[in-house]
Image (cartoon, rainbow, N blue to C red):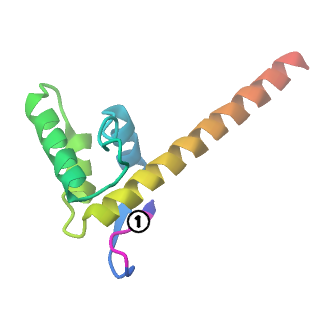
Amino acid sequence: MYTIQANASGTRSIDVSEKHLETIEKYSLFQQLIDSNGIVDETVLDKLKLNTRSLIASMEENSKDLLDLCIDVIYHNNMKAFGLHQLILLYIKWEREKEEKEDNEDESTEETHNS
């Protein structure tokens, strides 16, 4: 479980689970989300909310993971642009750590086979 800061003063936070991050990855929710200016503001948060709402409405199969992400994180009372920016930074860090772990596993598997 991770905790992101939801406001600049640090008085509000949101818990984000590994499952939430996997859902963001599964549905590529951050892809094409931020404009070329790179600024995360309330319009970007609104765009994310609309995208997830649209995804849920168009899905025929079970979308419990996406619904959980919406309830727990995206539509959380404390979620504002600052919190979304922190969530994006957490996601980037999580992705990097995941890739490093996979690379390390690949290297150790290679070493085992070469021994």
Depicted 105 relative to depicted 36: above or below: above
Q: Residues within 10 Å of mark 1 (few under 14, many from 20)?
A: many
**Residue 59 image offset from top left, x and y in percent:** 14, 28
Question: On the rendered structure, is 95 left or right of 46?
Answer: right
**Which of the 4 image quadrants contains residue 102?**
top right
Question: Which residue is tagged 1?
Answer: 4
Q: Residue at x 78, y 30 (%)?
A: 108
Disc 1, SS: strand
Question: Of all residues shown, which one is farthest toward the top?
Answer: 114
Q: Amino acid at mark 1?
A: Ile
**Residue 110 image offset from top left, x and y in percent:** 79, 21
Q: Is residue 16 magenta?
A: no
**Which of the 4 image quadrants contains residue 42?**
bottom left
Depicted 48 relative to depicted 78: above or below: above
Query: What segment carries the magenta color?
Result: 3-8
**Residue 10 image offset from top left, x and y in percent:** 39, 79
**Which of the 4 image quadrants contains residue 30?**
top left
Closer to us: 44 or 17: 44
